[in-house]
Amino acid sequence: MYKNCIKRVIDFLLALIGLIILSPIFLILCIWIKCDSRGPILFKQKRVGKNKTHFNILKFRTMSIDTPKDTPTHLLENPDQYITKAGKFLRKTSLDELPQILNILVGQMAVIGPRPALWNQYDLIEERDKYHANDIRPGLTGWAQINGRDELEIDVKARLDGEYVERLSFLFDMKCFFGTITSVLKHDGVVEGGTGKVKKVKGNDT
């Protein structure tokens, strides 16, 4: 019942409330991004959703408009040269993810779930298939994000996403939600470009 119905209702209500409360912050960030560099305020990128359908994820733009498209940041030769001044702050604080509230409202994403893979991250998509992690809505944050975030290797990240699918419940979602707040405040697991070199999971209590 929770997975198929209640979770979606909670996601919608949280997204709606969040959009209303955070609207002043949205406005301030929109003005800053527009004044800081040329280009649109929002960044759209093709991602993998529930049952491997594709959708456009929304983020505040953190990189210059000449950045190579559909390329993960860690695969760029020098990511720092593309990141804007506002973008550095947005990435460090994870505020660049706020527009995904709109993705949640329309049902493309959930508050908690596996982070949506890029459409061309075939290795991650294939690995997640082993754990049925592609069968649910991707999330704004998830179990893997509070257990390593950018530092996790693909196989470890997929396994954690699969663990989330197995343990999916209201209480586990709450654990991920509050764990995310702690991780963001501490900047745990943040590696600019996401090098993916860590082999062990930090903070995994299972």
Image (cartoon, grey):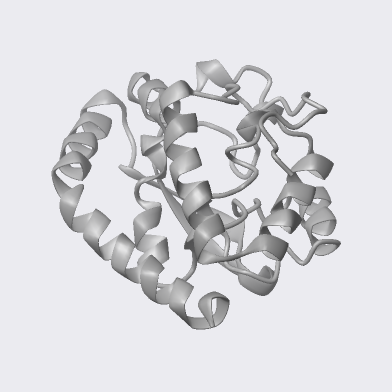
Q: Is residue 3 left or right of residue 120?
A: left
* Number of numbered labels in the structure image: 0
Vertical placement of 169 versus 39: above or below?
Answer: below
Q: Is residue 42 left or right of residue 164?
A: left
Across and down, in percent, residue 3 comes to 56, 75
Of 120 and 21, which appears nearest the observer?
21
Across and down, in percent, residue 36 comes to 27, 24
Residue 139 in view, yes or no = yes
Q: Is residue 9 left or right of residue 45?
A: left
Of 155 and 160, which appears nearest the observer?
160
For the point 60% across and 22% down, the residue is 191
Vertical placement of 9 versus 115: above or below?
Answer: below
Residue 78: name its quadrant. top right
Query: Which quarter shows the N terminus?
Result: bottom right
For the point 62% across and 26% down, the residue is 193
Query: Which quarter shows the C terminus?
Result: top right
Q: Among all residues in the image, which is located at the extreme left?
A: 24
Across and down, in percent, residue 168 comes to 62, 64
For the point 22% across and 44% down, the residue is 26
Residue 127: name its quadrant. bottom right
Residue 112 in view, yes or no = no
Vertical placement of 39 versus 166: above or below?
Answer: above
Of 50 and 149, which appears nearest the observer?
149
Across and down, in percent, residue 74 comes to 67, 28
